[in-house]
């Protein structure tokens, strides 16, 4: 293939964008009543093809394009594949979600794809402004997706809240970039690392890093920046929550890994302490908050805060083990969380009338397969062996222990003890409590929607495929983690290779940079 | 292909495959029962391969039927299985109890049978996995996995409204210390770079795990705590009574004791010999207290299941007492008593389950005079009681005698006093068991038997109970059959301790006291 590097490097993004635009165009000419499922299949096909492209890129070695602003290496490909897989699973799960409820489902598919483009861009940019653009692309689509169920009060609240707070957070991120630029004279991650050594104002640079940490901490819902999470997760449509609790988080974690390990390696002890605090706080607040929830989606929201904490624990470990542990955990977390939300989607349906723990009573009797899958995902979230969650936790905490952060590991493991309490509470609702005499939900709205919801719903084929895929992924990550681990390790080593070659690469990168090179000589 | 290489994998994975088959079969009529029975019997037959092909000649303390292949490269995790004298009979016992559990649940579980038997088989997988794993990581995976089916069994099939609380209590009690176990395990890995038990044990013998004595001490406590909760040892028994009173019969039979005691012997003692030795006086004291405490509380219970729970606590404390003496007699007796306790406890719980199936209550005051109505139940019940009490010629006598004599010889402070205290447990157990027999089977006909027409043992129940009773007698009359394998472990473990104390940071007193016991222990048998 004789395509120029700039085409090959961003080919996944191009394909997704084109598919998204195509879907928008077709959506506009489709009659209101017709089914949007073909559009969904188109989106799935587009995403799947990006997966193959990324897989192909893996064999090309490191690709740099656009004056070194884009770098496609094993690290970014790992996250490309992960995001692609999450998107496919989400799309499969939501193919039938809008049937008969929303006439504009085509936009949904397009927005999901655009969001994915933004996330993928975040993972392969080595230039903070590019990262910011990716962040904005992905955020704006998720803001809209969060409010996609028009006419639901909670959906509107979710969207507005997410939008306002999210804008704040991205502003923080941008401010951080500005400060880092002021201190080091560049917004390129590699050049920042080089500039740090000679920077006259390292404190300002660190402040910049802390600001970026705030922005990304918001995206990954780490503890002091987590307040939006429960409300947004509760209001947003369940498949969207499954998507936005995993893919943007994975992207944000990827950026965080790149910025911290490649951009600020000299300050590792200092930001590791920050991460230590964030990790401990996120785990504790997330788990304690989840204890008292009665809404399944809110409970999962708090649990995702806690999981962000576990993941942050990997950042406190020295690079080798920390990066690959973080990558593996992201993958495991994505598999089980998307799966759990896919089950919630199936149980709740579009109107989400079945949402509290009480509504899950006796689920095992009514829908045994779905209940068993939910149980499996919850056990994985707890971290029971032979599931992906177990290995994820195992790698993260062993990395932390190897780095000498034994107390963080102890806090984390005790936290996972607390965590199992609320997961078990849901499990006990599903398995041990009898369903209410009538399987129909009691509240008024459900009765209005009629019998279609209450008459034993079956899992549609695409949703079934999606659930099977996520469950198989969770199981495989728990039994044969070798392949993913290998990929995570090569991701980690490619990232470390970038950071190791930083000083030599910095000058060339910086000279290509379109930004004023004034700070370079500092 | 030599079956010796795959026998352990077969034993672990046949129940798993069985569980998968069961999920696919329709839950109609007695399909589930027959399928589960077939799977468990097949597993039992497979476990019987072990004693028949066990090589007593090979060097004691070594593992047999080993299988060691790399599983995951990055943290060096191996799929390493193997058995020795300690685990072999425990596996056969676990194999035996499973079909009995199925037989006894035949009628008692009449709803959601598929869920019940699938979980039951998964529990079997986890327990077998615990007994065969020689890789710490693999072991830990099975250890954690064993929690889940049991928790769901208790939560779903418990008898009263309190079952969910009991289940969650059980899970949390076991899961949180397991976190400490994992932390300790990872620390060990960070120090040594291996999860392999034989390697770790060898390093421990050379005092080469870590120069940091404080950290080693904390890690050993992490191990010990995780296991002690699961046994349970005296002040950590909060979950036991609730879990036992709620859990269905087949689950109770395998609930407490053997896996945790085994883990203590296998991992705590092998990896932390010095630390175990140091903590032993405390554990012996707790064991002695547990014996008396369990016995006294059992004496005042009116609920049969609670009585059985406290009795279990007492019996398990006896075993703790034995193994923490670090004498050959104590170790052998302790391990033998694990088998006895599991068998006798299982029979006891089966009988209680039978009574509940007939009369729907565990309240002792509702019973009375059952011997007239159910002569066979009464007969077996009395036999089981005699075994629990420790009547000579029955199995528990051998175990308890060895434990007490081992504890009398132990090198720790106050051991005479504590042994004397523990010996009162024998009297207490006789007191509460006989009191119960009298209240339930003799006296006048109680209100329940008057109101409800029970039925005597049917063929299925006979089949479930008599093998156990026969084993009581066999294990009491010729313990050497079992002791041969157990002693190879006990002796090597005692040697191991002696070796630890012979090398530099040695304690001459321990060495002197162990060698005479070697001869006395051997002579007595």
Image: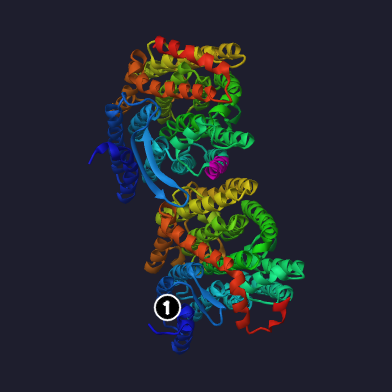
Find disc 1 in the rendering and name its residue. Answer: A46
- Which type of secondary structure does the marked residue at label 1 adopt? helix
The reply to whether residue B428 is visible in this rendering is no
- Where the N terminus of chain B falls, by quadrant? top left
Give residue B268's position: percent from left, percent from top.
52, 32
Q: Residues within 10 Å of mark 1 (few under 14, many from 20)?
A: many
- The number of callouts visible is 1
Give residue A85's position: percent from left, percent from top.
45, 68
Which span is picked out in magenta? B179-191
Give residue A471's position: percent from left, percent from top.
42, 58
- Where the C terminus of chain B falls, by quadrant? top left
Residue B66 is a magenta residue: no
Quadrant location of residue A445? bottom right
Front in this rendered view, residue B173 or B5: B5
Front in this rendered view, residue A433 or B79: B79
The reply to whether residue A509 is visible in this rendering is yes
Quadrant location of residue A285? bottom right
């Amino acid at each position: 293939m004789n395509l120029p590097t700039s085409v090959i490097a961003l080919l996944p993004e191009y394909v997704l964008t084109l598919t998204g635009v195509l879907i928008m165009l077709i959506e506009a000419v489709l009659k209101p009543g017709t089914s949007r499922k073909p559009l969904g299949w188109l989106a799935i096909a587009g995403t799947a093809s990006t997966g193959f492209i990324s897989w192909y890129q893996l064999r090309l070695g490191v690709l740099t394009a656009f004056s070194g602003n884009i770098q496609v290496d094993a690290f970014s490909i790992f996250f490309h594949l992960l995001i692609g897989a999450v998107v496919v699973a989400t799309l499969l799960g939501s193919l039938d979600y809008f049937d008969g409820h929303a006439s504009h489902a085509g936009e949904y598919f397009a927005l999901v794809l655009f969001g994915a483009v933004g996330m993928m861009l975040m993972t392969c940019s080595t230039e903070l402004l590019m990262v910011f653009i990716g962040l904005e692309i992905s955020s704006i689509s998720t803001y809209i997706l969060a409010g996609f169920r028009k006419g639901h009060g909670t959906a509107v609240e979710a969207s507005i809240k997410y939008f306002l707070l999210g804008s704040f957070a991205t502003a923080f991120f941008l401010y951080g970039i500005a400060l880092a630029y002021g201190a080091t004279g560049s917004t390129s991650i590699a050049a920042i690392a080089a500039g740090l050594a000679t920077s006259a104002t390292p404190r300002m640079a660190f402040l910049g890093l802390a600001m970026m940490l705030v922005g990304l901490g918001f995206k990954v819902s780490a503890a002091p920046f987590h307040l939006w999470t429960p409300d947004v997760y509760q209001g947003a449509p369940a498949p969207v929550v499954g998507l936005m609790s995993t893919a943007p988080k994975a992207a944000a974690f990827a950026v965080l890994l790149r910025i911290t390990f490649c951009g600020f390696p000299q300050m590792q002890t200092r930001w590791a302490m920050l991460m230590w605090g964030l990790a401990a706080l996120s785990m504790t607040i997330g788990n304690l908050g989840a204890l008292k929830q009665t809404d399944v989606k809110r409970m999962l929201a708090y649990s995702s805060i806690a999981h962000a904490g576990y993941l942050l624990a990997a950042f406190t470990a020295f690079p080798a083990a920390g990066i690959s542990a973080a990558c593996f955990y992201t993958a495991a977390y994505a598999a089980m969380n998307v799966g759990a939300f896919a089950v919630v989607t199936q149980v709740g349906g579009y109107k989400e009338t079945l949402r509290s723990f009480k509504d899950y009573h006796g689920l095992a009797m009514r829908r045994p397969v779905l209940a068993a899958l939910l149980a499996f995902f919850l056990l994985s979230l707890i971290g029971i062996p032979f599931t992906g969650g177990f290995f994820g936790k195992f790698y993260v905490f062993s990395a932390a222990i190897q780095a000498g952060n034994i107390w963080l590991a102890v806090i984390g493991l005790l936290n996972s003890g607390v965590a199992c309490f609320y997961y078990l509470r849901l499990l006990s609702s599903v398995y041990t409590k009898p369903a209410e005499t009538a399987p129909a939900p009691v509240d008024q709205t459900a009765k209005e929607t009629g019998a279609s919801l209450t008459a034993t719903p079956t899992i549609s084929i695409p949703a079934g495929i999606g659930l099977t895929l996520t469950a198989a992924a969770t199981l495989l990550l728990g039994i044969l983690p070798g392949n993913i681990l290998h990929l995570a390790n090569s991701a980690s080593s490619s990232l470390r290779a970038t950071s190791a070659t930083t000083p030599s690469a910095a000058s060339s990168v910086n000279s290509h940079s379109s930004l004023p090179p004034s700070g370079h000589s500092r | 292909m030599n079956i010796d290489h795959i026998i352990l994998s077969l034993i672990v994975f046949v129940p798993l495959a069985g569980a998968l088959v069961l999920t696919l079969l329709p839950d109609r009529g007695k399909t589930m029962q027959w399928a589960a029975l077939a799977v468990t019997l097949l597993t039992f037959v497979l476990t019987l391969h072990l004693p028949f092909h066990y090589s007593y000649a090979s060097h004691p303390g070594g593992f047999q039927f080993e299988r060691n292949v790399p599983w995951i490269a990055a943290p060096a995790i191996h799929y390493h299985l193997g058995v020795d004298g300690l685990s072999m009979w425990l596996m056969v016992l676990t194999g035996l109890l499973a079909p009995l559990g199925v037989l006894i649940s035949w009628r008692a579980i009449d709803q959601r049978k598929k869920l019940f038997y699938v979980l039951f088989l998964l529990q079997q997988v986890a327990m077998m996995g615990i007994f065969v794993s020689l890789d710490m990581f693999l072991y830990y995976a099975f250890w954690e996995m064993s929690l889940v089916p049991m928790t769901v069994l208790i939560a779903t099939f418990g008898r009263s409204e309190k079952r969910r609380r009991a289940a969650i209590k059980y899970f949390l009690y076991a899961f949180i210390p397991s976190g400490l176990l994992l932390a300790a395990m990872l620390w060990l890995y960070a120090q040594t770079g291996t999860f392999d038990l034989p390697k770790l044990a060898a390093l421990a013998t050379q005092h080469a795990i870590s120069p940091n004595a404080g950290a080693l001490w904390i890690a050993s406590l992490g191990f010990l705590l995780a296991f002690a909760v699961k046994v349970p040892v005296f002040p950590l028994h909060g979950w036991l009574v609730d879990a036992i009173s709620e859990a269905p019969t087949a689950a109770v039979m395998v609930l407490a004791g053997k896996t945790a005691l085994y883990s203590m012997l296998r991992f705590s003692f092998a990896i932390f010999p010095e630390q175990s030795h140091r903590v032993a006086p405390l554990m012996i004291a707790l064991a002695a207290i547990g014996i008396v405490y369990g016995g006294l509380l059992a004496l005042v219970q009116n609920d049969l299941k609670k009585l059985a729970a406290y009795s279990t606590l007492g019996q398990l404390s006896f075993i703790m007492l034995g193994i923490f003496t670090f004498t050959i007699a104590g170790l052998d007796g302790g391990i033998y008593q694990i088998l006895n306790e599991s068998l006798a406890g299982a029979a006891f719980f089966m009988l209680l389950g039978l009574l509940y199936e007939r009369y729907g209550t565990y309240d002792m005051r509702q019973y009375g005079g059952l011997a007239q109505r159910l002569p066979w139940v009464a007969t077996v019940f009395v036999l089981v009681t005699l075994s629990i009490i420790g009547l000579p010629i029955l199995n528990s006598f051998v175990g308890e005698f060895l434990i007490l004599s081992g504890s009398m010889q132990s090198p720790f402070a106050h051991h005479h006093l504590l042994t004397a205290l523990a010996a009162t447990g024998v009297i207490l157990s006789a007191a509460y068991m006989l009191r119960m027999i009298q209240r339930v089977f003799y006296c006048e006909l109680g209100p329940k038997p008057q109101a409800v027409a029970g039925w005597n043992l049917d063929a299925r129940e006979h089949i479930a109970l008599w093998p156990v009773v026969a084993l009581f007698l066999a294990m009491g009359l010729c313990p050497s059959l079992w002791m041969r394998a157990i002693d190879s472990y006990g002796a090597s473990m005692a040697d191991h301790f002696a070796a630890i104390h012979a090398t530099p940071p040695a304690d001459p007193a321990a060495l002197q006291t162990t060698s005479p016991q070697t001869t006395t222990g051997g002579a007595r048998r």
